Structure formats: C-alpha cells, structure tokens
Image: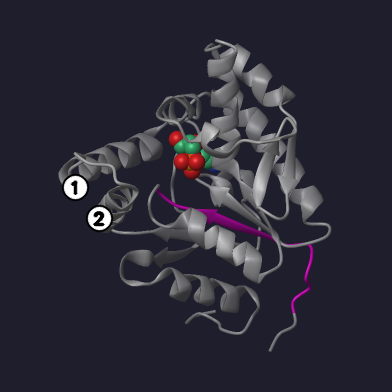
Amino acid sequence: MIKKNKSGYIVAIDGPAGAGKSTVSRLLALNLQGRLLDTGAMYRSVAYFGVKENISTEIGLAKIARSINFDYDVKNQSLIVNGEEMGQRLRTQQVSGLASKISAYKGVRQILTIRQRELAQSWARSCPVIVEGRDIGTVVFPDVDYKFYVTADPTVRAERRHQQLKKQGTKGVSLQSILKANIERDKQDSGRKHAPLKCANDAIVVDTSKMSINQVVHFMTEHILGRISLIGE
Ligand code: DC
C-alpha cells in the first residue's frame, strides 16, 4: 500500500446536478478525515444576500461575493456564512433559481474562484480538502492530483429525484417534467460562456447510474489512498 500524506491535497469533484455528487463528496470527506468545500453553497449564498438586499446587478452581486465571510463547521461539514449556519435558507426555489442565473456572471465567478482557491488551500495545510462544484477540475484547480467527474444517466437522475420528492410527500411532480428540467439545466450549465460544466481531460469519470453510493465512495477512497490503480496508469 502506498502511504499518502494525510494533509496537503485537494480532490476536485465535478458533475451535473442530481448525479449524487454532494452525497459522495460528503462521505469521501468523512472517509479521508478531510473538509468539504461546497462551492454551490457559495453561489447560493451570494444569491441569498442578493435577494435579501434587493441587489441584482452583476457589479452589486460581485461586491456581495467579495464581502461575505466564509468559514467551516467541522461537525456538520457545512459552510458557515457570515457566522451563521444557513441550512434550508440556501435551498429555497428563489435562491436556487437566482444562484443558477448569477453563476453565469463573469464578475461573480472570478471572485468566487479566487475565494475557493484561498479557502481550499488554507484548509489543505492541515487536512485533505474535497472541493465540489461544476468547474473545479477545469478552472478552479486544474492542477490537482485527484479529479473525478461524477455523472449519471439523465433518466436515472430524474428517477432518483422523483423518489426523493415522493418520500418527502411532494405530490404532482411527474417524472417526465423532472427529466425535461434536468436536460434543460444540463444544457444551461454546459452551454454557458464562462466556466461551463465539462469533464476535465484528466478526470476519472464515475458513472453512478449502476453503482450504489457506497460503491462509488469506496472506489474513490481506495484510488486516492493508492490502494487501487486504474488500467493504463
Ligand atoms: O451544486 P448546487 O446546486 O448547490 O449549485 C448551485 C448553483 O451554482 C447551480 O446553478 C450551479 C452553480 N455552480 C457553478 O456554476 N459552479 C460551481 N462551482 C458550483 C455551483
């Protein structure tokens, strides 16, 4: 077994919405005793304060992106925003919609990219850091050793979301409408001008369509710890 230094490395995880990326990243961070940087939560935070302060211009939102104070709650593996645990406040439909819109703004992306680098690099001095997003392996950290692109068939992603909504007791959302929205969102994320969602050339593609979350996390952990190598490595 190759021994890996416990600290000092960053793992980039990208992929479309609904592929299981967040769950996988969280579990991987636990396995590696590292921290999780949820960059989507950073975009959502900017959107949240944009709504709260009634600011919608690119310049105004970029200013918000610069001024927010981000910290980390080790116990909950979550981002602390201006001293607060944001919880469901970042998950409302309004904030989700605006986050998606502002993530296309170059001014906002540039600032959040710098802040993501600063945060992850400072945390990586003492532990591994899992950075999850859409442009991590391509733009934010193109030179890191570990890059994964977590994806799944659009139909499988839609089915998972449908099951989740059913479990939560949400009625009246059809599988077809979720599938349609997923395809639309993928198109938007992959087609935007600045830092579109795309798989880095050197990323390991992990298709979760036919794998359980545990299988995915096990594979990634073993790969990072050097216990398995891929064909051709
Ligand atoms: O992963 P999420 O759904 O929490 O992300 C929220 C929004 O931010 C989503 O519209 C995609 C966008 N995003 C992005 O453009 N780049 C990232 N690195 C992370 C998220």
Q: Does the stretch in magenta take in 12?
A: yes
Q: Residue at the spot x=60%, y=18% of the render?
A: 61
Quadrant placement of the N terminus: bottom right
Q: Nearer the viewer, residue 36 or 219?
A: 36
Residue 200 shows in this picture: no
Answer yes or no: do the residues labelled 2 and 1 have beta carbons within 8 Å?
yes
Q: Amino acid at mark 2?
A: Glu
Numbered badge on residue 143: none
Q: CA distance from mark 2 to mark 1?
A: 7 Å
- What x and y, as percent, mark residue 58? 55, 15
Q: Which residue is mark 1?
A: 175
Residue 100 shows in this picture: yes
Q: Which residue is mark 2?
A: 159
Q: Which comes sooner in the sequence, label 2 or label 1? A: 2
- Tell whether 24 sits left or right of 119: left
Q: Secondary structure at mark 2?
A: helix
Q: Judge whether 151 appears above or below 86 on screen.
A: below
- What x and y, as percent, mark residue 53? 60, 12
Q: Residue furthest right?
A: 125
Q: Amino acid at mark 1?
A: Leu
Q: Nearer the viewer, residue 121 or 89?
A: 89
Q: Which residues are magenta?
A: 4-16
